[in-house]
Amino acid sequence: MVPVNYYFIDFGMSTRFTSESPRLVTGTLGLDREPPELSDDVPYDPFKLDIFLIGNLIRGVFHNVRHGSSLSVLIEVTSSNSS
């Protein structure tokens, strides 16, 4: 038996950054309307948004996870509204 690795990449919206540019974006396009930082006016960190989105995805797939398990802690940390 060989371990399997899963990779979640490209959540449908991509931005290319040069090394000199700030790594901030604006925009509210996307399927998930829950992220608090989404804004057409205020720049936000897309990498933090990716962590939030993967947390929401995991929470949606494993919504019956026992509270207090290591997976429930991961879900809570990655999908919380704090920065």
Image (tube, rainbow, N blue to C red):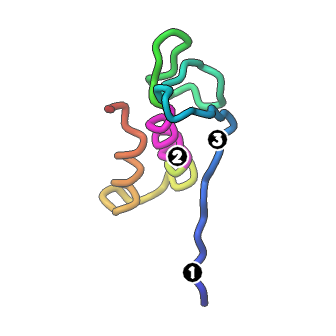
Residue found farthest to the top: 41
Residue 35, x across and y down, in percent: 48, 28
Q: Which residue is mark 3?
A: 11
Q: Eyeballing the image, is 3 above or below 80?
A: below
Q: Taking 71 as reference, is 33 left or right?
A: right
Q: Residue at x 46, y 26 (%)?
A: 22
Q: Eyeballing the image, is 80 above or below 70?
A: above
Q: Taking 80 as reference, is 53 left or right?
A: right
Q: Secondary structure at mark 2?
A: helix
Q: Residues within 10 Å of mark 2 (few under 14, many from 20)?
A: some
Q: CA distance from mark 3 to mark 1?
A: 24 Å
Q: Secondary structure at mark 3?
A: loop
Q: Residue at x 49, y 34 (%)?
A: 49
Question: Callout 2, which amino acid?
Answer: Ile
Residue 3 circle label: 1
Q: Which residues are magenta?
A: 46-57
Q: Residue at x 57, y 53 (%)?
A: 61
Q: Secondary structure at mark 1?
A: loop
Foreground residue among 29 and 24: 24
Q: Residues within 10 Å of mark 3 (few under 14, many from 20)?
A: few
Question: Callout 3, which amino acid?
Answer: Phe
Q: Eyeballing the image, is 63 above or below 22?
A: below
Q: Is residue 37 magenta?
A: no
Q: Are marks 2 and 1 in contact (CB under 8 Å)?
A: no
